[in-house]
Amino acid sequence: MDLRLMDATATADEIAAVDVVLGPPESGWTGGVMTAADTRLAQGGYHAAAAQRHLLLPALLQVQSEIGWISEGAMNYVCVRLQVPPAEAHGVATFYALLSTTKRPDRVAHVCDDVGCRDRGGGAILEAFGDRDDVVPSPCLGQCDRAPAVFVQRAGESDVVLGNSEPMEVELVLGGGSAPPPPVTAPQVGDGSLRLLRRVGVVDPAGLDSYRSHGGYEALIQAIGMSPGEVIAEVKVSNIRGRGGAAFPMGIKWEGVAAAPESERYLICNADESEPGTFKDRVLMEGDPFALVESMTIAGYAVGATKGYIYVRSEYPVARQRLEGAIAAARDAGLLGSDVAGSGFAFDLEVRSGAGAYICGEETALMNSIEGYRGEPRNKPPFPTQVGLFGKPTVINNVETLMNVPDIIADGGAAFAALGTEQSTGTKLFCLAGDIAAPGVYEVPFGVTLGDVIELAGGVTGSGVLKAVLLGGAAGVFVGTEHLDMPLTLEDARSRNATLGSGVVMVYDDTTDFRAILRRVAEFFRDESCGQCVPCRVGTVRQEELLARHLGGESLDADLLAELAQVMGDASICGLGHTASGAIQSALQLGLVGD
Amino acid sequence: MAVLGAGGGTSSYEEIESTELIILWGSNPREAHPIFFHHLMKGVRNGAEMYTIDPRRTTSAQWADTWMGLNVGSDIVLANAVGREIIAQDLHNKEFISHSTSGFETYAARVQPYTLEYAREITGIPAEAIRQLAYDYATAKTAQLCWVLGITEHHNGTDNVLALIDLALLTGHVGRFGSGLVPIRGQNNVQGGGDMGGLPNKYPGYQDVEDPASRCKFEEAWGCELNPVDGRHISLMFDAMEEGTIRGLYVVGENPAQSEADADRIRKLLANLEFMVAQDIFLTKTAAMADVVFPAAVGWAESEGTATSSDRRVQRIRAALQPPGEAKHDHEIIAMLANAMGHDWGSPSAFEIWEELRSLSPMHYGMTYERLEELGGIQWPCPDLDHPGTPFLHSWLWEDTLPREPAPFKPVDYAPPIDPLSEDYPIRLTTGRRLDSYNTGVQSGGYQSPIRHGGVLDMAPADAARLSVGEGEVVRIASRRASIEAPVRFDSALRPGLAFMSVHHPDDADVNRLTIDAWDPQAGTAEFKATAIRVDKITV
Amino acid sequence: MNEVALNIDGVAASVPEGSTILEACRSVDKPQPTLCYLENLTPVNACRVCVVEVENNRLLVPSCSRPVEEGMVVNTDTERVRHSRKMVFEFVASSVQMDLVDEETREWMDYYGADPSRYGNPAASSLDRDSRHPGHHPIPDGSEAANVHQPIKVDNDLYVRDYSRCILCYKCVEACGEDAQNSFAIAVSGRGFDARISTEFDTPLTNSACVFCGNCIGVCPTGALMFRSEYEMRKAEIWDEDEQSVTRTICSYCAVGCNLDLHVQDNRIVKVTSPIDHSITDGHLCIKGRFGYEYVQDLGEMASTPIDIVLARARTT
């Protein structure tokens, strides 16, 4: 490609960072030293550039991680290596909150002030640091069970997460100190009825043998003894629905991809868990990473994919590291690679990092992100099962959904279907946080009531009087005490105009300032809108402005808010826009705000 | 393309959008034919593999899957080696060859000496890459072989073209949708000029001057006697001026004082003419030397008429502006001149002239102004009023019964550039175009281009370093004919020993004083692409 | 090709398989408003002003890109559709200067009763739009309506970029990139409301990959991208489209045969476009076809008409 590069040149450190991801340059035309042979023959061009475009984000992330920001010189080097036009690379880099194209401090603390952490110390930390350029507010970090959470990017070192943090600890880490990763917690540890969580806190997340001694990989061995069609049949019998929010039947999705005419197919695990209030997938990945690897191997076998990606949000460094360890160990043990467990089936996994963008949890935005483009959602149809990653048929499921697969195979689909209710089969993880005695991830069969789950987590703290629950996350809705008797199932939620979403149960007592919470929700969607479609790009701005006016003392223009909600819900491209006003509208209906 | 019986590119632009293999050979459409490149890119995005064969890794070449940086003027060696390799790998299209071509045995024998090893030595391209090109071209279902002046501006340009046509005959990559030979014409309406008989050996519609039947037809239509002998092409004209057999010249819309190779010689010959008339929209360097200048209107913006594009498409041009002052349409001037010389031509309109053309040139007969308008242009041949035009040529090669003689292979041999490299002139200078400019710059110089480089010498950074020359430094550039000065620009797309200058800025850097006027005996085109130069630092 | 039958607002329509709903609507003389759609570009369906209601679809669907299906029942003028279109127009017009959009768009805005003023007073022009960091925005107090107003960018002799008029329809990016020019000089940068069309690091066009083909201007629906000639003439208040003729001819440079539409005012070419429905150019040109006309009307010593004088004076180099 006839790139016009920038004049800036990369430093040796920047080049080294990029080469970690890309290896040394292959020719003088792509960043190496020009040889006599190069002046006679060059191979590359459009197709070669297209084939490696997917390495753009990993290369930019590596520069960010090693150097602390992405200079023009570093970006230039990435561009010549990957033959990406600089304007496009810049467009990608400036899409992600955790990439910086301007110089900034080597360590930057992202302090959660979202719906969970804001009133639990997050706001106070931010206030303590004032206008410092190395302490910035952050959307939910997926650590609501140990609020307030802080995520620290550290140039040249791995990023760290601080839980139950305080200003002094933040100061310490910003000053060069380190902090051990917080332990993985699941309040129900030891409960014999657990399925998804039964190994969390029990097995060694770094030990394949430990995993195997707790039943790991038995399901895979069983699955490869079956035909792919038989595996899919069991999944269909289980009637399991996706746990990511859309609740699509997993078996149907798998069947669609397995039946696709193209032989090149992909499997993606959506581990970009960014819905405010959600942290269940993190707990699974940190506590039982081999189970996800095994689950995906079975899924790959069933649908005929040879490559799977796990797209993990950047704010989960521990999960990423444990998954990478698990993948390497599985590969070494012949459980991944060209001949999985001696079956002749070839399958491998790769972890990809997000870079700070809620929208990349939307499945098609996630695919664009992996492919090296801005994380803008695609219009559907076509659906990923037809035209997915790299334009090929793709199964994309979230972590919790996939982790059910081994048990479905081991126990049979019918046994799984017997759990929960007829329409909502199996167990479900709920993320209890907020004004609750024992925050954490809880596993219960579908059908347990909202009140039961809150009791399971020790009941309401704060004033002790429940005012509302944010169900399903920022993209979900507020429900009041009249719904404590709601059985937590897909069908009951739907019949009450609510949603289980990603399993968020964020509890608020009756002293909560909901105007501030709503405003934070509005701010969140305004920040996280990708900007592609008009209803969401401008609607989220206008929504925040209307709430700001109200916070400033004006009466709330509920009619106009409802008009905004309607167009965002009707005409946006993706789920972000569709749900960006749901929580706010429900709060208005509940009378949590307003005149 | 005379081998196949027509003087035009075989394919439509749209074919390159769905072909399997694209070869750009001596062609840089990214800069010289940007909108053709848009079509090409659609093909690449649709999955076409692309080769570019060019001494420079041009902006076009940077899009190619494979770029081959051959030595200037070694094209025949490469083409013959590819041909030999296709035969050696038994990948030639035997059915097509036996049915639609003649002379294969001779061709096969002639290319025998062009081994991969020999080709590597002469062209500089690795043998394995040549083998791969042969394989890919022979096995592609469809392939477009495109060339431009990088093939034709050599002393043996016609032979270069024949070598490429032979490859198409060897593989059957001609006469089918998606497979063709695509010489993108260098200048606006150069195709139309030839179509209209602006060639020394042709009447309009490619009817031969030396064919009595054709001549009769035109004599009858025009009511006069016509010279039965072919005329001279431009290079022969200059030779005739040198001999004194041409003493007067009528130059219409050309600037030979700057555009021809070995410009010092050309200017001398023009200056020695007894009488020269220039008809132009500018007072060009050539017009300035003329005895009489006819101010002409701008064809495409101030006059009515037609233009024919590279895919043989005839389209209407229309007047949008009133010409300034006394400027008149070209056809008006010519008619007035004829009238003044005692022939009553009246003052025919562009439309009337077109109607006469249609009546005499069968390939244009179906192209009424009305139909041209309605169809957005028509590709010749278009022999009748219902004919849709011809998107690609030579489908006859694939007919069960050939309507004419099979297409002959025309084996050719390598002849190196006339201007050899030596110790005194060690650098190979090649010339060409840049995106924002055109020819000698008389038109394109009129607007402010933010991407213009001006008259500079592009050099490999290593060569410049050897001479201790910095970017922007003015150097002396000498060939065996003359020397000029120009600033240096570094271009890492050039290998050491290769330099490039555009032809666009003769007032700043008079590159054609350096070039050699060795010309192709059949086409008359000079060897603009291969000049031996030396570059010297100017010491003060 | 197979025909697909569908119903649009109660009217039977039949279009070739693979057609879009928009094409089907046009086939039965039911034009729909569009902003980001253009026949020679890949639909990005980002503006959402062309949305329609399709039976059995929970959401409104963009007519510009959704292929028709046999038996589809489409409604283009329901309350839901009208509401979405009105809101999209209000959103766009309350955040972007829209005074140069075409008459048709203005008529649609009137038709849907779009009232951009109800979001509050427009915010002042901002200087930092090119450097906003994704995920962080100044928290508004609601006293004014945020917009994209910003200073105009003039960094060369051929174009100006006035991003206060940019509705982020992606057309320029597509024309500069894979739909035509393949230069990729501009891309969408930033995120959300701070998303913007930008060169790398907001470098001037003259330092970017721009080759000044003008294809971005050719597709811009709002006048955000403008030929310098038009910009200067508008500034001097001598731009007068009623006085302009448009004549189609063929480019005088290389031999590809590109169709040019010469826009002429007072015997001066003031703008060059290309028909988007011609198979040679698909509406796109190169720098020579787009700007190389100037020799016909020298702005040097021969500059004589008011147009010449305005344009000659505006030259920066």
Image: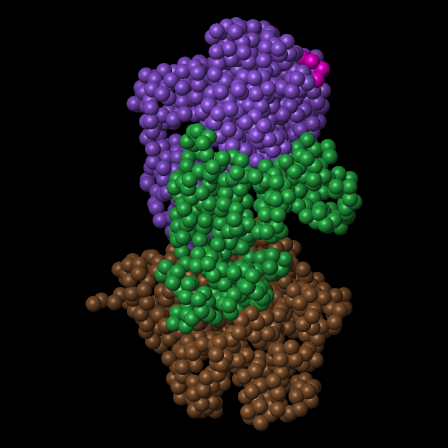
**Image coordinates for residue A490, horizontal then vertical, percent:** 66, 18
In the picture, residue B314 is in which quadrant?
bottom right
**Image coordinates for residue A193, horizontal then vertical, percent:** 60, 7
The image shows residue A168, relative to residue B66, as above or below, that is: above
Q: Is residue A351 visible?
A: no
**Image coordinates for residue B375, horizontal then vertical, percent:** 68, 65
Which residue occupies the extreme bottom position in the image? B342
Looking at the magenta stretch, what is its main secondary structure?
Answer: loop
- Decide which of B320, A275 is in the foreground and name it: B320
**Image coordinates for residue C184, horizontal then vertical, percent:** 48, 49
- Decide which of B300, A326 is in the foreground and name it: B300
Is A118 displayed left or right of A341 in the figure? Answer: left
The image shows residue A224, relative to residue C244, as above or below, that is: above
Q: Which residue corresponds to the image point at 50% horizontal and 18% vertical from the top-left?
A: A514
Q: Which chain is assigned green? A: C
The image shows residue A303, relative to residue B375, as above or below, that is: above
Q: Which residue corresponds to the image point at 42% horizontal and 63% vertical from the top-left?
A: C311
In the image, the segment drawn in magenta is A420-427
Magenta segment includes A166:
no
The image shows residue A452, relative to residue C182, as above or below, that is: above
Magenta segment includes A422:
yes
Q: Which chain is assigned purple? A: A
| Chain B tint as drawn | brown
Q: Which residue corresponds to the image point at 67% horizontal and 81% vertical from the top-left?
A: B356
Q: Which residue corresponds to the image point at 40% horizontal and 16% vertical from the top-left?
A: A121
Number of numbered discs overlaid on the protein picture: 0
Coloring applied to the structure: by chain
In the picture, residue B538 is in which quadrant?
bottom left
